[in-house]
Amino acid sequence: MNFQEFLDKYQVVPVEHYVNKVVDNPVVSICVMTYQHVNFIKECLDGILMQETNFDFEVLLGEDASTDGTREICIEYAEKYPNKIKLFLHRRENNISIGGSPTGRFNFFYNLFSANGKYIALCEGDDYWTDPKKLQKQVDFLEENIEYGLIHGDCHFYYQGRKKWKYNANKNILNILNIENKSQLFNELINWKYKIRTATVLFKKSLLNLNLLLERNFLMADTPMWLDFSQKTKFKYFNDVYSVYRISDGTVSNPKSIKSQLKFKLSGYMMRFYYCEKFNYEVPTDLINRYNILLQDYSLLTNDFRSFDNNNYKSALTEQIIRKNLKLNSYIKLWMFYFKHPRLVVKLLKLTNKDS
């Protein structure tokens, strides 16, 4: 699928391109997706614009029709930095929903299709970069070591609701981050052990296979790229802190409700199963077992407590009951799930027997 085919399929209303003077052939394209980030977007853009480089870069700023003042800030920055920022003003009519929930997927792919750089970096509008030499150090390495196609680093976590920091998020997994064998790398990514902090990444644009990414709509957009890239190139980890990853409640990756949390995790498992099959890897038995447990819990929630949702009995009571019932004997939960999804249970049992 090329850019025009993507637009024909998903675009309802044309995206407005703000006037700019960005060079045609930058070395790096920085993709920024923002929505309702009025309190954070300035810090994000300032962290990008402070980059000290001996090459040109472009900032592809996709603003997803925010109503909190984010759009106005983006326009202000686009007018102030026309040589750096390409501002795309999106409309909600173009939103790509997954499982009935709105996502930033159209914005994300629009940026990737629009990128003109040899390399691509990513930064969500509520995250920000901390190292003014980030891009220069990463480009220098990739230019000098052509066998590598992706480079990433460490970051700090900031829990917005609790006002708490977790420094050096990768400090306990440094031994894993030096893997170069592609099958081992894939396995560690599949099992959530090899962590790639998206705002720290720089990768070669030539690695992108947007057709593959668009084949299936999963709730997470970055991990499928890393799984695909792991079969094409080597990854390099620098133990430098490049960014701050802000964790806020109510986002796609950190939803508030238990149901949405389970739904996001289940999508993560389904995505991993899909790429195992795509690249001819056996699905780890442990992964299937964990998926089964989540699926049983999700079935309990969606079947037994639907009336609570319909009658607006929210959070506290419902979650107490759910937490209590999640401790039920696994056989009871499995039978409840079986009566709802007998074919899927049989298929999963076959997969489990195959691996054992």
Image: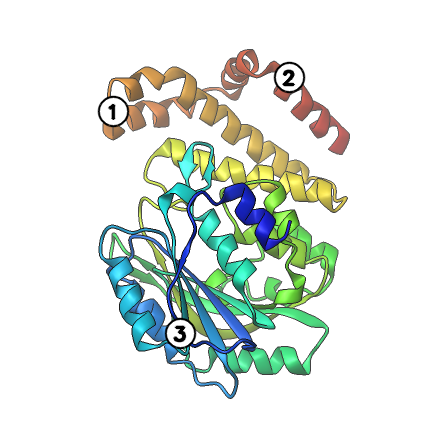
Residue 265 is situated, as x and y percent measured from the top left of the image, at: 49, 39
Q: Nearer the viewer, residue 319 or 215?
A: 215
Residue 142 is situated, as x and y percent measured from the top left of the image, at: 63, 77
Q: Which residue matches tag 2?
A: 343
Q: Secondary structure at mark 3?
A: helix
Is 347 on the left or on the right of 320, as rendered?
Answer: right
Colouring scheme applied when the structure was drawn? rainbow
Which quadrant holds the C terminus?
top right
Is 40 on the left or on the right of 228, as rendered?
Answer: left
Amino acid at the residue labelled 1? Leu
Number of the front mark, 2 or 3: 3
Number of the front mark, 3 or 1: 3
Amino acid at the residue labelled 2? Arg
CA gap, disc 3 to disc 1? 44 Å
Which residue of the protein is positioned furthest toward the top in this rendering? Answer: 339
**Residue 344 picture quarter:** top right
Q: Is residue 4 above or below residue 74?
A: above
Dot 3 and dot 1 residues touching (CB under 8 Å): no
Residue 13 is situated, as x and y percent measured from the top left of the image, at: 42, 46
Going from N to C along the chain, the mark reached first, 3 or 1, is 3
Pointer 1 local density, CA inside 10 Å: few below 14, some 14–19, many at least 20: few
Q: Secondary structure at mark 1?
A: helix
Q: Secondary structure at mark 2?
A: helix
**Residue at image point 48% right, 85% down:** 53
Q: Which residue matches tag 1?
A: 317
Amino acid at the residue labelled 3? Ile
Q: Nearer the viewer, residue 160 or 119?
A: 119
Q: Which residue matches tag 3?
A: 48
**Residue at image point 68% right, 40% down:** 284
Dot 2 and dot 3 residues touching (CB under 8 Å): no
Going from N to C along the chain, the mark reached first, 2 or 1, is 1
CA gap, disc 2 to disc 3? 50 Å
